[in-house]
Image (cartoon, rainbow, N blue to C red):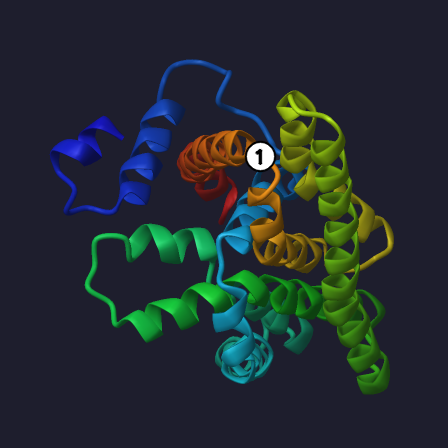
Amino acid sequence: NVVHLVYPKIPLSIYQIIAGILLASLPTEATKFTMHPELFMMVVIAPLMFNDGQNQSFRYLSSNIRSILSMTVGLVLITVLITGSFLHWLQPETFSLALAFMLAAIVTPTDAVAVKSITTNMKVPKNVNGALEYESLFNDASGIVLLDLALETYRSGQFSLGHGIWIFVYVFFGGIIFGAVLGSLLISLRISLMRKHVDIGSIVIPINVMTPIVVYWLAEELHLSGILAVVAAGVIHSILYDRMRLTSTKVQMSTTTIWNIISDALNGLVFVLLGVMLPQVLGRTS
């Protein structure tokens, strides 16, 4: 972060990845670890996506819902089909069709954290930047669902189009509905507590910070998209924040400050961990 302040022309994420690689090159066993993907998603990615959701404009989201959905679902699906088919055609012995689609599903969705980090110091048209940021909030779920379908096909050797569509709809839209409902209940609890008690920041702020972890965990237990549930809960918070401001300005300022710190720390952690684990991954790859 200090180096980025001195020379801001290079994206901060690149500095952080390099820092991770340097950390991994130290003569110590401490950096040789494996992080459980679900734990990483719940503790690191879920809070970041929730914070992005609660900082978005619901008015912009609702007015551009068709274009966002076309990129989130349509574009992801088409890109996976084209990329997977091309990869299978290029190396049919190495990549079966299901395996090729798995790889395509992994690399297709744009990442909200990466988009924001790379475009911070770039002149990008406002409508393009907004569309990319909103689309990258939701397309993770599309990619993960397609990955799961490809993985199931790879394991069983069979694929059912009807079953695949049903799973996609259940996971995608079920996650949005579940996150919106649970987010509404949690914010109602916070408002109720703040109206009945004056100095309640030490309770309602931790509730807010723990919201993405709880929402993600419960959604995944129901086999819904945890990422979409977290984003939906965040968007609901952005809608209802006007009601929150009427109850306690002090709590709102504290919450905003804490989330800024958490977001910056976790964003940095994501890219540093990427740098730390990159040499391990490359070392295990033939």
- How many dots with numbers? 1
117 or 261, which lies in front? Answer: 261
Q: Position of residue 253 (x, y in %)?
A: 47, 33
Q: Residue at x 44, y 43 (%)?
A: 282
Q: Residue furthest top?
A: 28
Name the image quarter holding the N terminus.
Answer: top left
Q: Position of residue 78 (x, y in %)?
A: 55, 84
Secondary element type, mark 1: loop
Q: Position of residue 86 (x, y in %)?
A: 50, 82
108 or 248, which lies in front? Answer: 248
112 is higher (above) or lower (below) than 1: below
The residue that label 1 is drawn on is 248
78 is higher (above) or lower (below) than 209: below
Q: Position of residue 29 (x, y in %)?
A: 50, 16
Q: Residue at x 72, y 69 (%)?
A: 172
Quarter-of-image position of residue 224: bottom right
Position of 1 with respect to 257 (left or right) is left
262 or 95, which lies in front? Answer: 262
Residue 83 visible in the picture: no
Position of 33 with respect to 3 (left or right) is right
Quarter-of-image position of residue 175: bottom right
Q: Residue at x 30, y 54 (%)?
A: 118
Position of 110 with respect to 47 (left or right) is left
Q: Amino acid at mark 1?
A: Ser
Residue 239 visible in the picture: yes
